[in-house]
Image: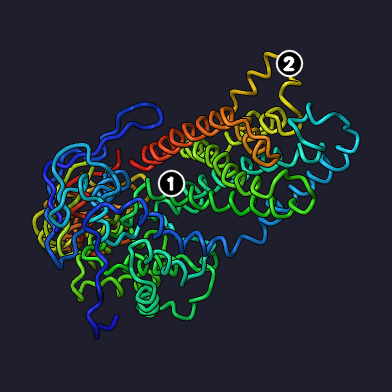
Amino acid sequence: MSATAEPTLSRDDHRLSSWRGVVRQYDYHWTVYKRTWKSSIVSSFLSPLLYVLAMGVLLGGFVHVGAARLGGAPSYLAFIVPGLIAAQAMQTAVFETTYPVMGALKWHKSFWAQLASPLEARDLANAMLAFTLFRVGSTCGVYFLVMSPFGVFGTWWGPVAAWPATMLVGMTFATWTFAFSAFVEGPDSFGLIFRLGLIPLFLFSGSFFPISNLGPVLEWVARLTPLWHGVNLTRMLCLGHLDWPTAAINVAVLVVLLVAGWRTAVRSLTRRTAL
Amino acid sequence: MIHARDLRKSFTDKAGHVVEAVRGIDIDVRRGEAFGFLGPNGAGKSSTMRMIAAVSPVSGGELRILGRDPAEHGPAIRSRLGVCPQEDTLDNELNVFDNLYIYGRYFGIPKREVRERAEELLEFVQLTDKRSAKVEGLSGGMKRRLTIARSLINRPEILLLDEPTTGLDPQARHILWDRLFRLKQQGVTLVITTHYMDEAEQLCDRLVVMDRGVIAAEGSPLELIRAHSTREVSELRFPVGDHEATAEKVADLGERVEVLPDRILVYSDDGEHVLEQVHDRGLRPIATLVRRSTLEDVFLRLTGRTLVD
């Protein structure tokens, strides 16, 4: 505690901008990630490839239908890969916004420590969502790269354009899941998300088969799910068969849900922490 | 530094009842002093602290911290405060140094400066040799010292300490008191809540006694003792169950008598003289003790809290 040189005092006189609120937490999330990235490799990168192998290659070997019935995909593998990547975006996003949020509130309590600094609930939500975006982006990015030599993409620019689409899907789920996690009392409710949300969406939102197979009523139900919009958008881009009006609707639905979810997430954490 | 008038805090508990934790208190904390909130659990100390820390919205009344309204200028106030919460909120998965470094970054302190500052603070709280250790393995006293170091990373003008030594062993408490005393000498304004009377006497220049959400008394420890207690206290211990009956026989020996489950306290200005008179009346206590009045006695007087119901 020597008082030799006059220290520069870091004082904030106003609310931080959203950008600075996130940037100040960069070191925190980066330090934690440096410690945990190895253990996330299996769930992020290895399991998705096992799905591709089992469903796309081995099971897909039995699927012999025309491209017309597979949304224009030349093979079942080409059909399923974009769907799996979009679903992976959802899963990564949900994973990053359930237990980590609960931990920061209840277990290691990092949110409470951060709130004693100039940061606000908004900044904490933004930084965690930004980190989730990084996780979704890197996971899906690697997925696209690994798949590209196998001729499943129609054009070179398809997966490049589909990459941000998967991030859009992921963040739509991340914001709403964050809002839920900041609202519920404990982690028991997460079972609800996984069993009633994640798994049915994963199975029936068009990742594995065209939703027209569901019959007219259930097909419309599937069309209402955000994951279907994500899967459809990602697949159209990857295969290079873009139906612009549909793509515009897909993007619009996801963007509206994302913005609403983000506002709900911030409000949810603000309410939870303003005791 | 801190100015409160008719400050109130209420919230709805899980059962849906409205709890009034703080029911209209006035406080003025001056620059450089050590100010204490003394009271039992549930007195409203922590709720008050959280409002002063600009993390908990005020339910009623007026509060100004460093001249600012926390509802309007939360981040500005928090950038000038250090907070040492009752429950440790250290990141167990990070090492000691990283806990300080990362926290400093929340305040926007440049990287190079926050590293230097972290090293200085480790030195100050005597944790330099634990620099790279995981927080998980530290003792309770070390964790608390690290929390204090963390709360100093932004060179705060006011340091808020909520029950700083609760749960620590005597040696760890003394180390902590020593560090807090040094901070006070450096001119840091300290605001401390405690339910330990000795802690309040050791550390606080001025304090308020809180009970059930209101302030029961205010002053320096010495003033409070003078105003609300006698110079000396004679403690008399009799066989279990005899205290109520015996108390009547000694009631006239002091200014006041308090009956506790395990002893009788007789308040007077000459404790030895009281003991002599007790013996003269043929009473034979198992054990006796004459001591000076402490804040504990003040508290007992003001709240009747530890009296036998």
Q: Say which residue label 1 marks.
A: A125
How many other residues sit within 10 Å of disc 1, few (<14), some (14-19) or many (≥20)? many
Q: Position of residue A204 (x, y in %)?
A: 71, 27
Q: Say which residue label 2 marks.
A: A215
Q: Where is residue B156 in the image (x, y as percent from the top left)?
A: 25, 66
> Seen from this angle, which residue lies furthest top?
A217
Residue lying at 26% horizontally and 42% vertically, measured from the top left? B57
Q: Which chain carries label 1?
A: A
Q: Where is residue A46 in the image (x, y as percent from the top left)?
A: 75, 53
Q: Which amino acid does label 1 sit on?
A: Ala
Viewport quadrant of the C terminus of chain A: top left
Local secondary structure at mark 1: helix
Residue lying at 36% horizontally and 52% vertically, measured from the top left? A115
Residue lying at 30% horizontally and 48% vertically, measured from the top left? B55
* Residue A259 in view, yes or no: yes
Q: Distance between the residues labelled 1 and 2?
A: 40 Å
Of circles 1 and 2, the one toward us is: 2
Local secondary structure at mark 2: loop
Say left or right for B168 vs A95: left
